[in-house]
Image (spheres, rainbow, N blue to C red):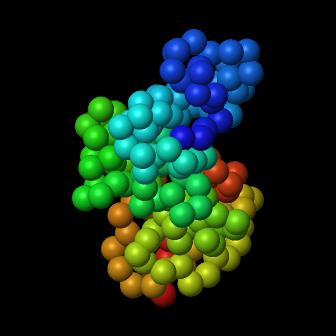
Amino acid sequence: MKSQICSICLKSGILCRSCEDKVKSGDVSESELKVAGMLLKLSEDRKVLKNVRLVKVVELPSILVVVCGKDDAAKFVGAGGHIVKKLEKELGKHLMIAEEAADVKEFAGNLLKPIPVLSVNTLYKDGEEVMKVVTGKGMPHISQGDFSDVMRLLYGKGAEMAEE
């Protein structure tokens, strides 16, 4: 399991200077540190987690969004959802797993799966740049507010969903 925190620090619970600096600067959140430690421990028993990559964890009041490496989402979920269910139970929050992406449209699509993202447009509201994410029909698994917060934290801009 790969993350921004080295495995030695995750195993020992004591952070080296480099890892401590990442936490102090905000590059790594306390939630990300906790999830990385849990995944490392789980990877000892579950070989499927050996080569997965934890990119980022975004904590919101109601959910944790776990951003993983390309093609790692199914491994994070586990057969029958057993890995994600175990993490949810221990963390006490609902988890959403989304793969990292090369651009905003692809990431929004990963976050909103199975609803297709048709386009991402830029709007200017009250002097602020906002992404308008146009989706196909369907009910997203994330609220409008949570979606906007995740996009703001990851991309520096708020976002709103609009169904075609």
**Location of residue 22 by image quarter:** top right
Q: Where does the image place residue 23, in percent across and percent down from the top left?
A: 64, 24
Q: Is residue 50 left or right of residue 155?
A: left
Q: Where does the image place residue 74, in percent across and percent down from the top left?
A: 42, 61
Most foreground residue, 130 or 12: 12
* Residue at (69% x, 67% y) in the render: 103
Q: Is residue 74 left or right of residue 72?
A: left
- Answer yes or no: is residue 160 visible: no
Q: Where does the image place residue 152, in percent across and percent down from the top left?
A: 62, 52
41 above or below 131? above
- Answer yes or no: is residue 118 visible: yes
136 above or below 85? below
Most foreground residue, 83 or 44: 44
Q: Quadrant of the N terminus?
A: top right
* Residue at (43% x, 38% y) in the render: 43
Q: Is residue 158 left or right of residue 46?
A: right
* Residue at (48% x, 80% y) in the render: 116
* Residue at (72% x, 62% y) in the render: 129
